[in-house]
Amino acid sequence: MVVVEEFTGAQCVFCPPGSEELENLLSLYPDNMIAISIHTGFFAMPIPNKSKYDFRTADGDALEDILGVPDKGYPSSIINRKEFPGEGSLHTVKTSWAGYIGQEVAQEASFGLTVGTTWDAGTRALRADVNAIARENITGPVRITLLITESGIIDYQKDIRYGEVPEYEHKHVLRDVLSTSVEGDVVATGTVTAGQSIDYAVNYTLPAEWKSEKCEVVAFISDGNTRYIYQAGHAKVE
């Protein structure tokens, strides 16, 4: 399962074609790809007097600090937090996404990972449970990151082709990182041996303004040093 973190924004005129490319790739790899849209930086500022929502988050800004400012412009994506030969940074341009995702999908996963959710509509209490099982010996530290995205949000978006689109559908919007650390929580420090099982869980209260039926929990297990994402999973809130 490949994680694609897209850096985007409401004022990025080239981002809608990038989002369309992500949707095409999700259709191509429906069981092997997860998209996360991170609204951060200048282009993520709401459109004055028009935007209803501000999709920027403190966690998104922190991730930009950790993963780097998109040096190739917007939209750019980070794929499994891997630096590919010739790129010079973690960020990749739209024309290269399909090839890099294909490369990662073809790799044997070092972990199996499952995500389950328990949802109480009355209290809006959410519990997310993650289980990862090593398929080979892995040198620690190892981290697990848990976050939540929301799709189907209608708001203004600038578009190089159409100017401004009032009824644009924003998808996979990063809402919050549920882990204690935005980099993920350390779940193993030494060597993780093949067959070893790791459990991780978070309790969270979903804000009232988020539509639970449009929200998704995303989890991934990563190298605590290089940040490379070994494996990921996702589950609907309800």
Image (cartoon, rainbow, N blue to C red):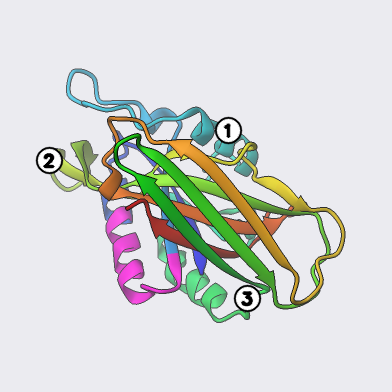
Q: Is residue 99 above or below residue 172?
A: below
- 3D distance between C-alphas at marks 2 and 3: 39 Å
Residue placed under numbered mark 1 in the picture: 62
The reply to whether discs 1 and 2 touch (Cβ–Cβ < 8 Å) is no
Residue 86 visible to the viewer: no
Nearest to viewer (mark 2 / mark 3): 3
Magenta stretch contains residue 9: no
Percent coordinates x, y for residue 101 in the rendering:
49, 70
Residue placed under numbered mark 2 in the picture: 167
Q: Is residue 235 above or below residue 171?
A: below
The reply to whether discs 2 and 3 touch (Cβ–Cβ < 8 Å) is no
Q: Secondary structure at mark 3?
A: loop
Q: Secondary structure at mark 2?
A: strand
Nearest to viewer (mark 3 / mark 1): 3
Q: Judge by depth and name the residue closer to the eye, 38 or 179.
A: 179
Q: Residue furthest top?
A: 49
Q: Is residue 61 above or below residue 14?
A: above
The crowding category of the residue bearing disc 2, from other C-alpha atoms within 10 Å (few below 14, some 14 to 19, many at least 20), is few
Q: Quadrant of residue 226?
A: bottom right
Q: Which portion, as a residue range, is magenta?
A: 19-33
Q: What residue is at 63 percent from the left and 76 percent from the top?
A: 109
Give the residue type at disc 1: Ala
- 3D distance between C-alphas at marks 1 and 2: 29 Å
Q: Judge by depth and name the residue closer to the eye, 208 or 15.
A: 208
Percent coordinates x, y for residue 53 in the rendering:
27, 28
Residue 181 visible to the viewer: yes
Percent coordinates x, y for residue 162 in the rendering:
13, 44
Residue placed under numbered mark 3 in the picture: 109
Q: What residue is at 64 percent from the left and 59 percent from the top?
A: 221
| Dominant SS type (magenta) | helix
Q: Secondary structure at mark 1?
A: helix
